[in-house]
Amino acid sequence: MFSLLYRMVRDRALAEDLAQETFIKVLNGIKSYRPEFKFSSWIFKIANNAAIDHLRRKSIDTLSLDGAPSAETPEQMRATSLQLGDRTESPLAEVENRELGTAIERAIARLRPEYRSCILLRHVEGYSYEEIADTLELPLGTVKTYIHRARNELRGYLEDRRD
Amino acid sequence: MTDISMHLNTDEIELWAQGLLPAARAMHLADCSLCRVEAERERKVILELVQLPKFAPRAGFADRVMAQVKVPTPSGDWTA
C-alpha cells in the first residue's frame, strides 16, 4: 500500500503521511468495514482515495515530467515540469531520485492518476481486473480500458527513450 | 471455437505475456508476425512492471500510527 501511495505522489514523506492517514481511518473506522469486501481491497481503496484527493487538491496531477497540461509554451512547460535532478541538496530527495528515477518509474509518473492506480494495482500488487473494479468502484470495462491505455502509453514512453 | 488465424485481442496478449494463454491460441503467434511483435512489446512492459520494487515507510511507522488510534479501555471509553 505504501508503494502505491509513493508512486502516486512521488514524495516519500507525503506518502508516509497518507499511509498513516489511511491506517488511522482503517483502524478507527473498523466497524464500518463490510466483510463482503476483501480487507486489503478496502485498505487500498482508502489509500487510493487519499492519494487522488491529495493530487486533486494540490493539482499534482500536473506532476507530469513534461509540465502542466495547461502549459502552452516551452517556457511554461519548463516552469511546471518535474525536475528530478534539481533537489540534490536534500538527502530524502536523493533517495527519491534513486528510487523513482528509473525509466519505468518516470514513465509511470507521466500517466494520469487514474491510469496509474489501475496499472499499479494490476501489475505491481497483482490484483485481478474484477478486484480493481471493486476496489476503485469503477466499471470493469473502464478498468480494462485504463489498463490497456496505460500499458500503451508506457510502451510509447519506454520505446521513445530507447530510440 | 476460435479460429487460429484470428489475431489475438488485448486480453489474450496479456495472458500470453503471463504464460497463461491456452496453447491453441498461442499457436497463432507462430504464424502471425504482427501479433508476435505486439505480444513481445507488451511482454516487455509487463515484465518491467512486475519487477518493480516494493517500498516501505521509515522505521517506527506502526508506532506512529498506533499513537493516533483510539483503543477501547476496560471501562469502555476510547483512548488515543
Image (cartoon, rainbow, N blue to C red):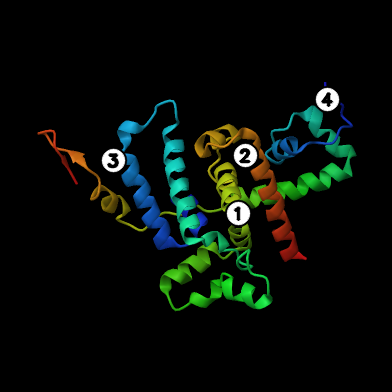
Q: Which residue is mark 4?
A: B2
Q: Is residue B3 above or below residue A61?
A: above
For the question of whether residue A1 can be seen, the reply is: no
In which chain is the residue bearing label 1?
A
Mark 3 and mark 1: span between their CA atoms? Answer: 31 Å
Identify the disc placed on residue A143.
Answer: 2
Q: Which residue is mark 3?
A: A28
In which chain is the residue bearing label 3?
A
In which chain is the residue bearing label 4?
B
Circle 1 crowding by C-alpha within 10 Å: few under 14, some 14–19, many from 20: some
**Element under disc 2:** helix
Please tell me which of labels 2 and 1 falls first in the chain: 1
- Amino acid tagged 1: Arg
Q: Is residue A112 above or below residue A30?
A: below
Residue A78 screen position, x and y as percent: 62, 75
Residue B21 screen position, x and y as percent: 73, 32
**Element under disc 3:** helix
**Element under disc 4:** loop
In which chain is the residue bearing label 2?
A
Please determine if labels 2 and 1 lie on a single subunit: yes
- Amino acid tagged 3: Asn
